[in-house]
């Protein structure tokens, strides 16, 4: 009986030792949830970490440069079983994202090449170009330089459409050749406010920034000179970042009707000042009517500052 117990104990120890070793092996082997592929093929080591063998074994073709390939839990399980790997998915959400390493020529560089080509063709001034979204980057294999050349350009008779051919990385090695059509749109620089401004708030230089708008979106009355905004105030609230029309601003009121203000008279030989009553509101430069408090005579005066006017003539 003792021998039977010893035999059962030995089987028990061996069984749980195998389970323990399997658990350790499964724990040590894992998936690389995000993996960068350098070459043209996918290797086993691009998918699993903790491998003790076959790390360089090729199991498929890599995605195109700059593209992704997703291996879901079912595909990963199929690979593990086929290669007798001690790995099983922990959930159906397990996946590996394989991204092919690439050299990417971004839109800024493409745009710079197009602007240079247009300039060489005599297109000057302030303008913006637009090209189809799927041409706003060019993808090359990772070992290629991010270089770009223009081999051909044609400009429409109305000079607002162009056709261009781009090659990358070079004319001698045209791995990518892109033919595209684009638009040339004239733009205008206009001053706008950095923040909303309400009536009564004087606009200062620090309140202003400049944006560009397409000429086709420009409408009559939009202010293009920032100096025309400085020192003015809004008739109603002005919204930040939006072009401002002349009809939306006014000079701030420096004189209020009924206020007792200072009238100055300078005839070249002497400068006299007296107190008068304003009969009208007035901004700087406005001509308003005032009445002399001592003589009760009505005068026309020009607003020169806050509660200050200068005479023009007497009635």
Image (cartoon, grey):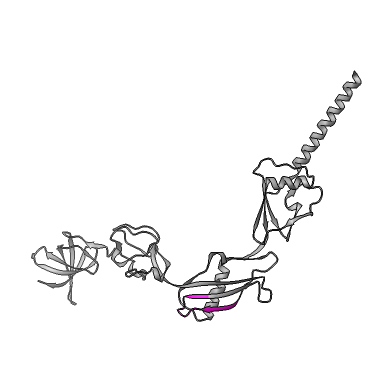
- Name the side, left or right, on which 184 lies relative to 2: left
Query: What residue is shown at x 54% (from left), y 80% (from top)?
Result: 120
Magenta span: chief secondary structure: strand
- Quadrant of image for the N terminus: top right
Tell me, yes or no, whether the highlighted magenta stretch contains residue 257. no
Is 33 located above or below residue 267 in the figure?
above
Q: Locate residue 199, reporting x and y percent.
A: 29, 58
In terms of image quadrants, where is residue 151?
Answer: bottom right
Q: Locate residue 32, reporting x and y percent.
A: 70, 49
Is 125 located above or below residue 308 in the figure?
below
- Quadrant of image for the C terminus: bottom left
Q: Locate residue 16, reporting x and y percent.
A: 81, 31
Q: Locate residue 216, reporting x and y percent.
A: 40, 70
Q: Considering depth in this image, is 305 or 159 the residue closer to the camera?
A: 159
Q: How many numbered circles does the render carry? A: 0
Residue pushed farthest right?
A: 3
- Name the side, left or right, on which 211 lies relative to 170: left
In terms of image quadrants, where is residue 198?
Answer: bottom left
Query: What residue is shown at x 34% (from left), y 62% (from top)?
Result: 203
Q: Considering depth in this image, is 195 or 33 the residue closer to the camera?
A: 33
Q: Considering depth in this image, is 38 or 231 the residue closer to the camera?
A: 38
Q: Which residues are magenta?
A: 150-162
- Name the side, left or right, on which 213 lies relative to 173: left
Residue pushed farthest top?
A: 1
Query: What residue is shown at x 8% (from left), y 64% (from top)?
Result: 296
- Name the side, left or right, on which 303 lies relative to 75: left
């Amino acid at each position: 009986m003792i021998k039977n117990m010893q035999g059962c104990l030995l089987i028990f120890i061996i069984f749980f030792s195998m389970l323990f070793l399997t658990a350790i092996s499964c724990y040590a082997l894992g998936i690389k949830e995000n993996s960068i592929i350098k070459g043209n093929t996918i290797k086993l080591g691009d998918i699993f970490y903790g491998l003790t063998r076959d790390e360089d074994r090729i199991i498929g073709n890599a995605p195109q440069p700059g593209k992704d390939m997703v291996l879901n839990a079912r595909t990963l399980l199929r690979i593990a079983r086929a290669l007798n790997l001690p790995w099983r998915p922990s959930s159906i959400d397990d996946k590996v994202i394989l991204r092919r390493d690439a050299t990417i020529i971004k839109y800024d560089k493409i745009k710079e090449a197009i602007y240079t080509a247009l300039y060489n063709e005599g297109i000057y001034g302030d303008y913006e170009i637009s090209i189809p979204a799927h041409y706003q980057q060019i993808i090359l294999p990772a070992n290629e330089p991010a270089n770009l050349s223009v081999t051909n350009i044609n400009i429409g008779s109305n000079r607002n459409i162009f056709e261009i051919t781009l090659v990358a990385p070079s004319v001698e090695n045209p791995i990518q050749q892109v033919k595209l059509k684009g638009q040339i749109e004239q733009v205008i620089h206009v001053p706008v406010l950095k923040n909303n401004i309400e009536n009564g708030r004087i606009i200062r230089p620090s309140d202003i920034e400049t944006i560009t708008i397409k000429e086709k979106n420009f409408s009559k009355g939009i202010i293009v000179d920032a100096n025309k905004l400085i020192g003015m105030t809004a008739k109603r609230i002005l919204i930040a970042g939006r072009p401002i029309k002349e009809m939306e601003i006014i000079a701030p009121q420096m004189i209020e009707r009924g206020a007792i203000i200072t009238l100055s008279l300078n005839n070249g030989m002497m400068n006299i000042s007296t107190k008068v009553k304003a009969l009208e509101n007035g901004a700087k430069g406005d001509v308003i009517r005032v009445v002399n408090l001592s003589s009760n005579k009505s005068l026309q005066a020009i607003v020169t500052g806050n509660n200050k006017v200068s005479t023009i003539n007497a009635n």
